[in-house]
Amino acid sequence: MRLQTTTGYTRIVNWLANKNHHPFTFQEETWQHIINGKSGLVNAPTGCGKTFSVFLGALIDFINLHPDNWQSKANNGLQLLWITPLRALAKDIGRAMEEVVSELGMQWKIGIRNGDTDINERQRQKRRMPEVLIITPESLHLLLAQKGYPATFETLQTMAVDEWHELIGSKRGVQVELAVSRLVALRNGQLKVWGISATIGNLDQAKDVLLSPVYNTPSSQWGEAGNSLPTSREGWGEIVKANIRKDVVIESIIPDEIEKYPWAGHLGLKLIHKVLPILNNSRTTLIFINTRGMSEQWYQALLNVAPDLAGAIALHHGSIEQELRIWVEEALHAGRLKAVVATASLDLGVDFRPVETVIQVGSPKGVARFLQRAGRSGHSPGEVSKIYFLPTHSLELVEAAALKNAVEETFIESKEPMMLCFDVLIQYLSTLAISDGFLPEPLLKEIRSTYCYREMTDNEWMAILEFITSGGNALQQYDEYKKVEVIDGVFRINNRRIAMRHRMHIGTIVSESMMKVKFVSGGFIGVIEEWFITRLSPGDVFTLAGRNLELVTIKDMTALVRKSNAKKSIVPSWQGGRMPLSANLGKKLREKFEEARDIQEGNGRKAEGRGQKAETSSRSTLLRQPADSAGEAKGKGKSTGSRELRNLEAQSPLTTHYSPDIELQVLEPLFRLQETLSHVPGANELLIEHIETKDGYHLFVYPFEGRLVHEAMAAILAWRISKITPITFSFAMNDYGFELLSDQPIPVDDTNVYELFTPQNLLADIQRSANATEMAKRKFRDIAVIGGLIFQGYPGEQKKARHLQSSASLLFNVFSEYEPGNLLLRQSYQEVFDQQMEEVRLRNMLERIQQSTIIITFPQQLTPFCFPIKVDSMRENLTSEKLEDRVKRMQAQLNGS
């Protein structure tokens, strides 16, 4: 059927023409696929009409099927199921849809169902479903828990998954995969499934993950489930790309004075005077801050310096009550606010048309996140998105230059899908068991049709069934774990108490929690992030509230400690939150540092010319020894190996001249000092600095791979060095590098450095260097809650975190002793390696280093690169005021030396 000849297309295009709009090519392409009964994924920049590409396609399909009475036909049952990751998106999407059907004169009803939907509206929906239902993944699973739920979906034609790039790679994404597999089976393969996504690095894989059940189920054209996906891409799901160039203007806010010795966190608020003119010149501005605590500080600081903004600016983050958040969203939509200070709570595609400008404060940590936030401004086709980058320390200006390159090249991060999430599967099976029950054999084919569970073995499936019916080998003596009964081959939950408990916690995905810190002798000290404490072993010393504390043990959700007189301690890496620098942004950052070095050397070499040098010098270790005098420190103390490298560089035939980024130009004094004292590393170099101060012997390493990888690498490197000689370390890290500090010389040199950074025996060394068992025990608590092993309590009577951890620890120990092959136990260790340790990225980094040049230098003082790491290592010992005074003294000493 040719789209342009259909009644539906004519009606929709006429409606658009009356509003002076015309459909984009990618929208028409999507509509054509929808009326042909195909599924796919729409990929388009933010604000270019992705929503209408699917929604209007569903309307065209309906009009074509009912050409004579499409306006008068009412009570059609559910036609379009629209999954959205955020409640905040639902109201805005619903408003846009209602406007369309009203102007077309259709009788369609638009409904919203999420945790905010009142019980009366839910009852109305149960009696008569609207034609469009906008729903979160959790609420969709609640629908699947209702008796007779298949009747709800018997008229369903299209299922849309909005913001798929946000869901994939998370357990909520796995919930969507399972829901797609169930609804596709209910509709006998006739359901059209469409994902809607902004730019993502692994677009083909994102499509495969969402649509796998559509083309890999018994009812599909591809035959039996469990078979491999068809080798031919033709016909197996469509990817519709919008060939629309969304212009993004990125402008850095340059400090009046560039500190040669930068430190993280302090600079941002000092530039607030440069923010006010931006606010005054824009109708509405979104100011994105990485953490909730800093967003509160920025909101108050703006009011302090510009009291006249009272009532015209607002604050929006996840800890603010729902009513106030909704008011802010409505006021933004109506254009009543001059500025909103927000965290990631406003990242996604709510249609805030009046927003003219976006300010990103500090590192966005990733290219995709930066583009998403930039797209909040100019949120209409053809409009320019304007975003300002405000650094929180000088070196972050390099990130601005790196982001410009990455955006220009569309160098976007991938979102890796999660595999074999047994906790989510157990929750899903219990959901089906409290509604109409399930037969295991056909359901297994559905589940294996998903990307997440396509590699699940028969033994794993049988273990899951045994687990939900008897509790498995370890828990079979306890009746409370025998939740599911088998009656005439059908698996059901008939116990009303168990069913009620499960309904209350469907969709539970657990977030990070805090842990109390107390003295063994009594006395409360404070709270600390749980992820940090679980990396420590008894006897380790860390800093909190200005005190050095030795960890004695962890009991329930409390870390018991005693005072320590140790001079060295591990500093919690709190600043900026736990969100690490992405691999893509790290790569671009390394390239920009090489450009900065090239500027220093005056050769103006472009990135294309670097490959020959890096290849020629691969796996060489260059030593730059400490100079005996200030004169030698300025270039006379470089080793023969370093001179040879520069001779090779001079012979490169690819030398061209270019204009450096403004950010690199203003940072030129900083880079000149770094090169004088040590070295500015290239894209295929790893810089290591040995520095001795009154605090001890420092080893600074700069992989530019994000704080999670650096934290793991610091622990592994400390472990590997300790095998060479008995030695103890404290360490600190940021997104650019990490520090090992000891009271004796650190034996890292050109004879052993490549062995110390080898990827061999990585998993074993991770387990030896970190408290993997304790970390897995914490991860198991979340898995046990999702899998229904632990009941969190009734509304208003939730169990305290320490009770949950106590129950989880008991179960963890029972499984470890009596059922070591338990699937949830295995999953907890796997998630620790994949998520907390970022094992894959860590391995990739080590493999890259093996092919790179390692530069070892011996600066006579702290360098601009190591200074921010050094400051972070001091941060928790001092109040912010004392820290700033101490840093200023250090800067004065270093600048005067």
Image: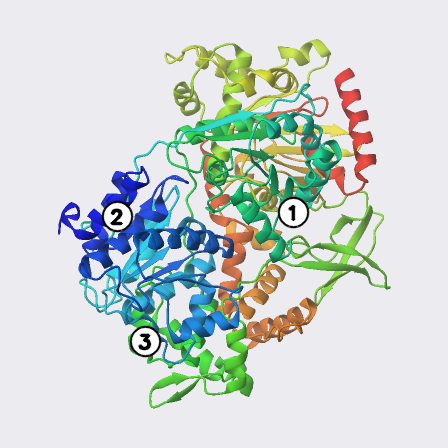
Colour pattern of the rendering: rainbow
* Alpha carbon distance from label 2 to label 1: 43 Å
Label located before the other in sequence (2 or 1)? 2
Residue 648 vs 566, above or below: the answer is: above
Residue 586 locus on image (x, y percent): 51, 34
Name the residue carrying label 2. 12
Residue 341 locus on image (x, y percent): 62, 41
Q: Residues within 10 Å of mark 2 (few under 14, many from 20)?
A: some
Using the image as rendered, state which of residue 878 and residue 125 is in the foreground.
Answer: 125
Q: Residues within 10 Å of mark 1 (few under 14, many from 20)?
A: many
Using the image as rendered, state which of residue 164 and residue 171 is in the foreground.
Answer: 164
Q: Residues within 10 Å of mark 3 (few under 14, many from 20)?
A: few
Residue 503 locus on image (x, y percent): 50, 75
Residue mark closest to the camera, 3 vs 1 = 3
Query: Looking at the rendered structure, which numbered label has been put on residue 151?
Result: 3
Query: Looking at the rendered structure, which numbered label has been put on residue 292?
Result: 1
User: Quadrant location of residue 430?
Assistant: bottom left
Using the image as rendered, state which of residue 716 and residue 20 is in the foreground.
Answer: 20
Residue at (42% x, 48% y) in the render: 415
Residue mark closest to the camera, 3 vs 2 = 2
